[in-house]
Image (cartoon, helix red, strand yellow):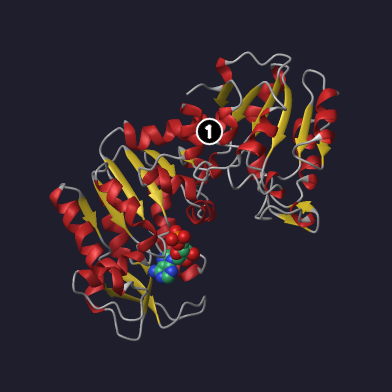
Amino acid sequence: MKYIDQIELKGKKVFLRVDFNVPIKEGNVTSDTRVRAHIQTINYALEKKARLIIASHLGRPKGKRVEEMSLKPVVKMLSGLLQQEVVFVDESVGGKVEQAISKMKDGDIVLLENLRFNPGEDKNDKDFARQLASLCDIYINDAFAVAHRAAASNSAITDYVKTCAAGFLLKNEIEYFQKALVNPARPVAAIIGGAKVSDKIGVLENLIDKVDKLLIGGAMAFTFLKARGLEVGKSLCEEEILDTARKIMQKAKDKNVQFLLPADVACAKEAAADAAVKICSVKEIPAEQMGLDIGPATITLFSDALKGVKTVIWNGPLGMFELAPFSKGTFALAEVVGNSNAISIIGGGDTETAIKKAGQHTKMSYISTGGGAFLELLEGKTLPGIAALNK
Ligand code: AMP
């Protein structure tokens, strides 16, 4: 794969695919995180005097123009961050776009309208890809968050542009993933939590081949505890996959991977911020209670297991962290990982929110910008958006 810094950009029309899928309220962008994530790539292209054509999706307009999903509100934020004019075109291909591009000088920026207003985008349509490709000399993909879905602007387009490369955000994602799973410093531990085992079977199966320790928390722990023959009361539990859970644990045993489940849990009769919390051993979860967080003994167990670990991969909160009484486990482990010398790679939307809430996000080595894309990498899948650049 080529990277943006290996290509001559001066005076070239550069099509940059980004993820500006930002939250918008009453016409205003309410968080600049996703825009900032691409600033390094954008600034680099501008410094090198490219003519920068930026394109993104926003929301799921399903091939139709939906005014609330226009990228127009991003113009103000982007030009503010760059201290430079950004020309917006309310189309992503066609005459208006071509005209705006023909007026560009070196170092100028044009932002195109939401790619998903065109039905060809999500269908990875060749004609739409060809039209996008005709706008540029060079194609740069920096949109990791959509790399797991083949779309015209991240897959088919690479068939029609001669020079294609990854931007710095995509480069970072790939390099950190390699540090975590391809060539990691050992021992490697994965902390996996969240709601459902069924969502993460592929992740768990793949990780067992790569890591030395698996620490399981969140609601998904109860399916494994039940599979071991324990009663889990009213805790979330996926009865239909108990067999799969047993197979996963057997595979871990066969591969000599330490598979750690909670020893105790914070329980309550209901998931509420003012619920009476009871700490129970996992062997004694009362029938009318549900486990909503790992307990103090598990915090110690997991913290001890992380001692000496050189690489940590974390996806999924260890409890219902949105409610204060059930945030302790996730926050405590976030502090342990944040204060450790291990390389720490965090991914998945809720995980990032939880780590931020714990105030530990600046201490992590890398927080992935892709929820689904990060999980698919953990599953060992090839992402179409990355494969297209490897051709
Ligand atoms: P996921 O998207 O699979 O990573 O799941 C994240 C969600 O799992 C969060 O909203 C948490 O509140 C929820 N969660 C974590 N632990 C539990 C639990 N013990 N019981 C119910 N929900 C939980």
Who's the residue at 31% across and 81% down the image? Answer: 233
Considering the numbered disc 1 on the image, is that residue within a helix, a strand or a loop?
helix
Kindly indicate the quadrant of the structure image that contains residue 183. Answer: top left
* Residue 167 in sight: no
Whole-percent x, y for residue 195 in the image: 41, 65
Q: Which amino acid, mark 1?
A: Leu
Whole-percent x, y for residue 355 in the image: 49, 52
Residue ID for mark 1: 170
Q: Nearer the viewer, residue 92 or 317?
A: 92
Q: Nearer the viewer, residue 221 or 113?
A: 113
Whole-percent x, y for residue 153 in the image: 62, 37
Graded by Cα atoms within 10 Å as few (under 14), some (14 to 19) or many (20 or more), the crowding at tag 1 reads many
Who's the residue at 40% across and 56% down the image? Answer: 332
Residue 55, above or below 160: below
* Residue 298 in sight: yes
Can you tell me whether the CB of the residue at mark 1 lies under 8 Å from the nearest atom of ligand 1? Answer: no
Who's the residue at 57% across and 37% down the image? Answer: 154
